[in-house]
């Protein structure tokens, strides 16, 4: 006889996420899944591969390439697409490319606005997607704690935090008019620890940037960043030192802080995380701009 | 050995233990004045879910908006949106997370004021346990009655009555007992199954994680230990119940495979079981079961012999029967009662009132059908529990209604099955979720008959009826 006790918290979270992914596939005509190559995206991809087995996910993966991602992320992305055989859509903002937008020259705000927020809007408009699946979690940031799993966006991709649809039980309202869309967050209820534990248990491949290694880093705006290519200003590159570091989140290399660490296996990473005293987002320069920054970015159309 | 030293010395065995954690979802009911956010902040802080940078942010914000003087305002750790922080109130439902060695917790943090009843209903819909906060100085208030009613309405069987701010009444045992006995009467009136009482001070952490020395007369557990050990019968996923499998998605990756995906809402299913598809009534047998959770990158076709709620699975059938999204698969030997006329409890969540006769889309599990609320039996005053006669429902109104659908569905009572006994109401023009409902049972035929016989028709209505019966026999119109 089967027993409910066999369903551990991770198995319950997994089942909930799969339910959400299938609901999207069943109710929307043109869904897409955001694929950022990070650990949360890896989990999402893994869940999507499970949900539709023995078939493949009936939607493509969309990567908004800011052209400043770690080189390894791009290699990893293309390799996974080949191994698993999913459809991959890559978009970069052509205007930004033309203007040669650089986080070093234009700063994090302009870079993020043009190459991330604007690029995302372009990709979504071009694809005409009615549902966009993302890997955001409610434990990441305070404004996310209040966001729905199926989060309505108007035709300008804007989120209205004060006017969200009530969301009860596991029944999701998927109704939209033409031009509107829904952002869907299947791992809303997972914590950072859940994500790591699941990666460990299921043996999900993730980029090696998460593991500690000797890497060339420089001090930049109060954080350590990695020397990933020649585009880093030479004056800065000259200050590079080799250090044992790893990354807790992955994004644009000039905007992603490295931490000193010797954790080179998953259990060691989890151990470090459990004993650490700063939250995951601290490594992201983007949130520091102002208090309530993420809430503002979401209202503007950022994830 | 402390948790930290265990993590530091033997992470692998720590992980092994934590793979087998259970999950518990609970709801906190109360207002800022009762110290709700402070209590949540305290739980997160003491279970190490608050990091130093977040604490530093709260510290700087405490100076700006804080209400606790020199101490860090725990409430600022949890109050999310900027507008709310400025106003110092919790408007929307926020979800928080923490874990102990035994359980992972999801807290639905909901506002307590009457104008946010719909938010509380939303938070309660997924909770197994409710914590009702009472200010020891004030005792049971109107809001306590309202919160208790909603908690019970949404089928939460375990209620923890947290009598907070005990520090302000000198940890008086008499005060505690007085509130306890008053609440016991209230719980009996409502029929709440399990109640637990704890004297607390969220501000100072008394009886939150550790037993307080200031309440030697209290022989129960501190809050966190109670949460860790409370025995949940998992009302949300009832595996003792008969099988309910709402078909969510038809998976046809190639010509050789046709599987029916969904989350088992109740009961369990085995290969070979004889099943009936509702509403068509066609029968077949289960040929194979794929548990999505068991699928790996290397083995994408793994099957299992048996699966139960709340697993996300894919079933294939022996025969090629027509099955689509919105159908319900049940065991042929345990068919549910099917009806299109249901007695429901409805919570109205929209500014535009609900008027009987308006057609809405009703989404129950994966089924979407047209329906209307033909009659409001009565509205309940959530503070006094009085029944009132009304002709329409406004925002936050809770009422017993007769719901009539254009297609019959399995009529599972919410009390027995939360996932197939619940539904949302969608406005067909604005697309908003305007209501949420719980099935009480099949609407009694006698009531309908009585209604029909008591109606007086005018001559014009009788003539119209005659005309329809004469000219449109295919409508099968009855004589009035």
Image: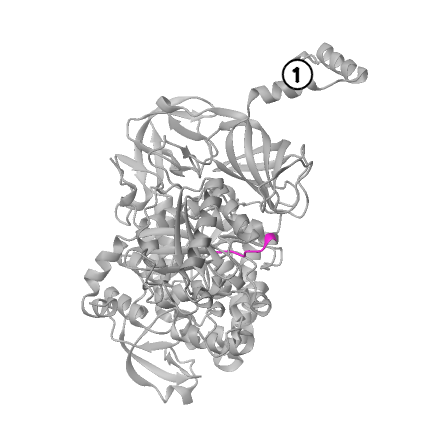
Question: Residue at point 18% right, 66% down?
Answer: B10
The kind of secondary structure element at disc 1 is: helix
Query: Along the line of sight, which residue is nearer the eye, B178 or A72?
Result: B178
Question: Residue at point 53% right, 73% down?
Answer: B67
Answer with the quarter of the image where residue B299 lies: top left
Q: Main secondary structure of the magenta part?
A: loop
How was this image coloured?
Answer: one colour
Residue A3 horizontal/vertical position (percent)? 27, 40
The chain letter for the residue carrying disc 1 is B
Residue B307 horizontal/vertical position (percent)? 30, 37
Please indicate whether residue B375 sits to the left or right of residue B93 in the image.
right
Q: Which residues are magenta?
A: B109-114
Query: Along the line of sight, which residue is nearer the eye, B89 or B326?
Result: B89
Please indicate whether residue B306 sits to the left or right of residue B259 in the image.
left
Answer with the quarter of the image where residue B285 lies: top left
| Quadrant including the N terminus of chain A | top left
Residue B271 seen from this side: yes
Q: Is residue B259 magenta?
A: no
Name the residue carrying label 1: B475
Q: Is residue B237 above or below residue B82?
A: above
Q: Is residue B390 above or below residue B27?
A: above
């Amino acid at each position: 006889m089967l027993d409910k006790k066999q369903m551990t918290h991770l198995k319950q979270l997994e089942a909930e996420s799969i339910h959400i992914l299938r609901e999207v596939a069943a109710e929307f005509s043109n869904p897409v899944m955001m694929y950022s190559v990070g650990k949360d995206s890896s989990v999402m991809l893994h869940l999507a591969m499970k949900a539709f087995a023995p078939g493949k996910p009936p939607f493509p993966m969309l990567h908004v390439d800011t052209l400043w991602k770690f080189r390894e992320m791009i290699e990893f992305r293309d390799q996974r697409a080949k191994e698993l055989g999913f459809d991959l859509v890559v978009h970069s903002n052509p205007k930004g490319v033309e203007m040669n937008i650089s986080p070093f020259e234009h700063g994090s705000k302009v870079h993020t606005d043009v190459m991330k927020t604007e690029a995302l809007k372009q990709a979504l408009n071009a694809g005409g997607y009615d549902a966009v699946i993302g890997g955001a979690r409610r434990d990441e940031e305070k404004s996310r704690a209040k966001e729905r799993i199926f989060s309505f966006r108007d035709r300008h991709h804007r989120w209205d935090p004060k006017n969200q649809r009530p969301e009860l039980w596991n029944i999701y309202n998927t109704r939209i008019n033409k031009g509107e869309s829904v952002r869907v967050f299947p791992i809303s209820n997972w914590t950072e620890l859940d994500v790591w534990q699941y990666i460990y248990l299921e043996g999900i491949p993730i980029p090696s940037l998460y593991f500690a290694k000797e890497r060339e880093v420089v001090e930049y705006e109060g954080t350590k960043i990695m020397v990933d290519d020649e585009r880093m200003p030479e004056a800065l590159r000259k200050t590079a030192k080799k250090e044992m570091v790893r990354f807790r989140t992955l994004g644009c290399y000039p905007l992603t802080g490295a931490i000193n660490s010797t954790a080179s296996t998953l259990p060691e990473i989890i151990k470090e995380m459990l004993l650490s005293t700063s939250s995951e987002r601290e490594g992201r320069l983007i949130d520091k701009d102002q208090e309530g920054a993420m809430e503002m970015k979401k209202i503007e159309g950022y994830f | 050995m402390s948790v930290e030293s265990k993590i530091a010395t033997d992470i692998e065995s720590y992980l092994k233990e934590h793979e087998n954690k259970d999950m518990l979802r609970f709801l906190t009911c109360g207002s800022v004045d009762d110290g709700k956010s402070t209590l949540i902040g305290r739980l997160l802080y003491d279970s190490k879910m608050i990091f130093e940078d977040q604490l530093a942010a709260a510290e700087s914000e405490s100076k700006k908006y804080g209400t606790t003087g020199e101490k860090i305002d725990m409430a600022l750790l949890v109050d999310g949106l900027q507008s709310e922080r400025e106003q110092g109130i919790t408007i929307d439902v926020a979800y928080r997370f923490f874990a102990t060695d035994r359980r992972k917790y999801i807290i639905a943090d909901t506002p307590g004021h009457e104008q946010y009843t719909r938010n509380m209903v939303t938070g309660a819909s997924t909770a197994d346990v409710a914590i009702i906060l009472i200010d020891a100085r004030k005792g049971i208030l109107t809001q306590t009655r309202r919160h208790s009613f909603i908690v019970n309405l949404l089928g939460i069987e375990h209620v923890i009555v947290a009598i907070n701010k005990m520090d302000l009444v000198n940890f008086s045992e008499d005060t505690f007992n007085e509130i306890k006995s008053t609440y016991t009467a209230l719980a009996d009136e409502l029929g709440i199954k399990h109640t637990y009482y704890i004297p607390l001070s969220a501000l100072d952490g008394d009886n939150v994680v550790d037993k307080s020395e200031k309440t030697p007369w209290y022989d129960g557990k501190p809050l966190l230990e109670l949460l860790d050990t409370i025995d949940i019968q998992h009302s949300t996923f009832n595996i003792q119940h008969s099988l309910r499998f709402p078909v969510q998605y038809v998976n046809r990756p190639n010509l050789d495979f046709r599987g029916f995906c969904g989350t088992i809402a109740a009961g369990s299913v085995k290969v070979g079981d004889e099943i009936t598809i509702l509403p068509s009534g066609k029968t077949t047998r289960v040929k194979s079961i794929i548990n999505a959770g068991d699928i790996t990158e290397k083995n994408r076709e793994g099957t299992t012999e048996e699966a139960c709620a709340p697993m996300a699975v894919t079933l294939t059938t022996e025969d090629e029967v027509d099955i689509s999204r919105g159908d319900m698969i049940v065991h042929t030997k345990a068919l549910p009662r099917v009806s299109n006329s249901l007695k429901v409890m409805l919570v109205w969540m929209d500014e535009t009132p609900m008027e009987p006769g308006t057609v809405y889309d009703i989404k129950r599990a994966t089924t979407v059908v047209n329906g209307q609320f033909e009659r409001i039996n009565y509205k309940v005053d959530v503070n006094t529990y009085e029944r009132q006669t009304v002709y329409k429902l406004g925002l936050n109104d809770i009422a017993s209604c007769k719901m009539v659908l254009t297609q019959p569905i399995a009529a599972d009572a919410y009390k027995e099955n939360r996932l197939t006994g619940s539904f949302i109401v969608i406005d067909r023009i604005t697309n908003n979720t305007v209501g949420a409902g719980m099935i009480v049972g099949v609407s009694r035929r006698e009531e309908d008959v009585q209604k029909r016989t008591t109606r007086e028709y005018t001559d014009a209505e009788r003539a119209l009826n005659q005309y329809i019966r004469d000219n449109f026999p295919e409508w099968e119109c009855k004589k009035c």
